[in-house]
Image: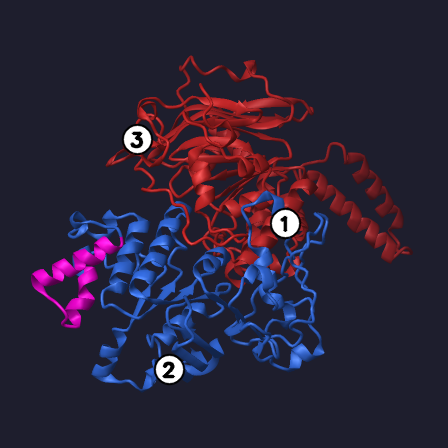
């Protein structure tokens, strides 16, 4: 599953420095699928970074490798897929509050299990298939919380609250003294709480579940935890999934086409919710989508993917005002606009290539109107053509048109 | 492009689906998928039909084609009531209509070659067979941008966009006057979608076709249509020959329009987010069906069902207060505006 350890070209994680606001750096990521028909080169040298507080969009058409990128980050690529090389550097804060850098591709499966759902969480596309239909919504979320979070302090606080409650409702009880000493005893343990029993843990997890559901604005959260997925509508189910993903306060939330199956009005609700939660929880979001409208409305940075390659990577305003890669500008012109009515849409000719035999050189060259000989021979290098605007193209367009290399 | 001659007149069309339950399959209730819908489709135009899932768009299209029997109302095609036509006449009549479905993989038989799939309507109707059939099929395929060597291939050998073109070719086979496009591009990618939309526009001009274009994608509908009808819970709430993005007058159309993500960051943050979700069509709300989610709902909306009223310029709106409301969906809202929470 992981890039081979003896590959000397990969530096060890200790040598790498990241800017303090870089949360995730994906570098040279290559993922292949070994199918009967041949090797599908799904990702080839994918590179982008996620800054703290950013909403990054990974946008592209079907089969361009968006979801494989997300799954590679979490190392969830199933057989026959394999991550061949690259680095996925995740900047985490350890228990002492220091920044540590973890290469997710070098981590052990045990370490990954602590990261998945806890530090980096994912919401999948189809809310109809993802919550397990035979378990209650609340139990599914509580399971994640109980697995990842240390609930001993929660348990203790719950006990204290209950005792204080008892004191308040019945201040003249015989055992007042006993209760107050108990409270004192529990309070003294708060800094190093004793391990709770399973039953206590369950109760605390349930309490947190309700809190998370309230966080995602689930109406009547207390009732929802006892419902099964089929009892909820599509939008509510998606909210429950987001709650599940957010239950452990992840640092990164990946939303893999999380709103694609929803109607526009519900989609608008969910997208707005995601952005509000991002600030509330101080998390960063990666939104994977094929809808450039969603990108423009919600994201701060964009990585445009085509056939397993990030062809353009920049901030949102820049991408829409000055698209430099021919694929990006073609894509933008192919969408029907609401602000103007044209007789004919500009179309990108041809179809997405088969990645078992990807085109040589630049993978977009067979469909590109500007392609020349060099495009078929050489893969264009990744370069920063303008400040914070990376592309992979021999013939940049837009404001960089005609520029000599 | 629009001439005022009606090709299809739909009058008070209703389609209820029975809900049965219990041991004896007793009728428990009705899903009012299409409930009292009236509109005309003019010759040569494209009527766009938009709405959220479950609002009855598809049912409406299929009922018009008489693929599913209507519950009540009239569908008049070129002066003839469709439901009066029976038996052999119906087959003859159906030549006038074609349909393109949403999922091209599901609407093409995986075991039948493209030649046979596109040629089947011609064969069944006794129009051509043998070599003549092959040539007619080839001509159709060339019309949609496919070539001779595609003839003997199977559906799985084609990409999504090509499959959708095959479906379009099949719908065109009998030289129909009217085609229902039921979400033809919702399963294709943007770059391919542009190809398909352009093709459909070209074909419309070439064959003088009339389209009923059903989609949930408002920008696509706007691009394709001469007039747009907005459906909500089985009713048409607004119908406009103008630009639905500019002059929506029904609060629902306005909310729908504002919820569409626009690929232009400078327009960010306009949305008046519509709270809640579409109620069940089994027990639709009383009065105006939109009132539980409407920002402007008053008492009258709960009791009285609003009729479609002409607001001038052929724009029909089913709202008691149409024209009196400041929908304000174009103004910008600051980012701190309240988050929609279900009431």
Residue behind mark 1: A273
Up the image or down, B22 lies above or below B267; here it is below
Instruction: Answer with the quarter of the image where residue A137 lies.
Output: bottom right
- The mark found on residue B76 in the picture is 2
Q: What kind of element bears circle 2?
A: strand
Mark 2 Cα-neighbour bin, 10 Å: few <14, some 14–19, many ≥20: some
Residue behind mark 3: A359
Decide which of tag 3 and tag 1 comes sooner along the chain: 1
Q: Give the foreground label among 2 and 1.
A: 2
Q: Residue at x 46, y 60 (%)?
A: B221
Query: Residue B208: x, y in percent?
Result: 32, 66
Front residue of A7 and B328: B328
Mark 3 vs mark 1, CA separation in Å: 40 Å
Query: Residue A218: x, y in percent?
Result: 64, 56
Q: Residue at x 10, y 66 (%)?
A: B129
- The mark found on residue A375 in the picture is none
């Amino acid at each position: 599953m992981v890039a081979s350890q003896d590959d000397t070209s990969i530096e060890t994680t200790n040598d790498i420095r990241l800017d303090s606001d870089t949360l995730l750096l994906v570098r040279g990521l290559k993922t292949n699928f070994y199918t009967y028909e041949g090797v599908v080169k799904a990702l080839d040298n994918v590179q982008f970074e996620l800054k703290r507080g950013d909403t990054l969009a990974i946008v592209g058409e079907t089969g361009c490798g968006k979801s494989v990128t997300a799954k590679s980050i979490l190392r969830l690529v199933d057989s026959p897929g394999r991550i061949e090389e690259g680095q996925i550097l995740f900047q985490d804060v350890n228990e002492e509050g220091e920044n540590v850098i973890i290469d997710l591709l070098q981590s052990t499966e045990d370490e990954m299990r602590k990261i998945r759902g806890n530090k980096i969480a994912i919401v999948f596309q189809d809310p109809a298939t993802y919550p397990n239909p035979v378990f209650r919504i609340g139990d599914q979320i509580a399971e994640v919380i109980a697995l990842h979070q240390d609930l001993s302090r929660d348990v203790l606080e719950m006990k204290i609250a209950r005792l204080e409650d008892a004191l308040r409702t019945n201040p003249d009880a015989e055992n007042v003294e006993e209760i107050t000493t108990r409270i004192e005893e529990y309070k003294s343990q708060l800094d190093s709480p004793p391990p709770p029993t399973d039953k206590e843990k369950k109760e605390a997890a349930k309490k947190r579940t309700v809190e998370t559901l309230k966080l995602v604005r689930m109406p009547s959260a207390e009732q929802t935890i006892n419902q099964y997925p089929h009892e909820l509508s599509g939008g509510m189910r998606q909210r429950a999934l987001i709650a599940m993903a957010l239950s452990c306060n992840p640092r990164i939330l990946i939303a893999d086409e999380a709103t694609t199956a929803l109607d526009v009005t519900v989609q608008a609700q969910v997208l707005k919710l995601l952005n509000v939660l991002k600030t509330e929880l101080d998390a960063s979001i990666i939104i994977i989508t094929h809808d450039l409208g969603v990108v423009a409305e919600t994201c701060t940075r964009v990585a445009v993917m085509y056939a397993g390659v990030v062809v353009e990577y920049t901030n949102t305003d820049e991408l829409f005002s000055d698209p430099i890669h021919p694929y990006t500008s073609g894509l933008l012109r192919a969408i029907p606009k609401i602000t103007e009515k044209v007789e004919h849409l500009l179309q990108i000719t041809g179809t997405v290539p088969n990645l078992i035999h990807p085109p040589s050189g630049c993978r977009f060259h067979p469909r590109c109107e500007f392609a020349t000989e060099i495009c078929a021979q050489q893969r264009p290098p990744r370069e920063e053509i303008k400040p914070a605007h990376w592309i992979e193209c021999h013939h940049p367009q837009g404001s960089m048109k005609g520029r000599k290399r | 492009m629009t001439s005022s001659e009606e090709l299809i007149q739909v009058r008070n069309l209703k389609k209820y689906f029975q809900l049965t339950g219990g041991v004896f399959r007793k009728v428990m209730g009705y899903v009012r998928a299409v409930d009292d819908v009236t509109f005309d489709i003019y010759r040569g135009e494209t009527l766009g039909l938009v709405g959220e899932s479950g609002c009855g768009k598809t049912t409406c299209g299929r009922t018009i084609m008489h693929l599913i029997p209507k519950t009540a109302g009239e569908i008049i095609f070129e002066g003839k009531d469709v439901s009066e036509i029976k038996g052999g006449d119906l087959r003859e009549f159906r030549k006038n209509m074609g349909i393109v479905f949403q999922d091209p993989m599901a609407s093409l038989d995986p075991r039948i070659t493209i030649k046979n799939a596109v040629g089947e309507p011609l064969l069944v109707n006794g129009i051509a067979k043998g070599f003549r059939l092959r040539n007619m099929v080839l001509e159709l395929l060339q019309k949609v941008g496919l070539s001779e060597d595609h003839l003997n291939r199977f559906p799985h050998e084609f990409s999504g966009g090509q499959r959708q073109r095959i479906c379009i070719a099949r719908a065109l086979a009998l030289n129909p006057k009217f085609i229902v496009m039921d979400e033809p591009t919702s399963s294709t990618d943007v770059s391919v979608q542009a190809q398909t939309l352009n093709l459909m526009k070209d074909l419309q001009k070439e064959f003088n076709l009339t389209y009923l274009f059903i989609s949930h994608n408002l920008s696509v509908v706007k691009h394709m249509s001469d007039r747009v009808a907005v459906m909500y819970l089985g009713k048409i709430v607004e119908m406009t020959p103008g630009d639905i993005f500019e002059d929506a007058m029904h609060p629902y159309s306005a909310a729908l329009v504002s919820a569409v993500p626009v690929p232009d960051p400078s327009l960010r943050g306009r949305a008046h987010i519509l709270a809640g979700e579409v109620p069940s069509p089994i027990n639709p709300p009383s009065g105006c069906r939109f009132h539980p989610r409407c920002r402007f709902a008053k008492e009258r909306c709960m009791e009285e069902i609003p009729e479609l009223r002409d607001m001038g310029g052929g724009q029909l709106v089913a709202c008691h207060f149409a024209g009196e409301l400041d929908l304000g969906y174009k103004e910008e809202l600051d980012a701190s505006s309240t988050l929609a929470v279900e009431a």
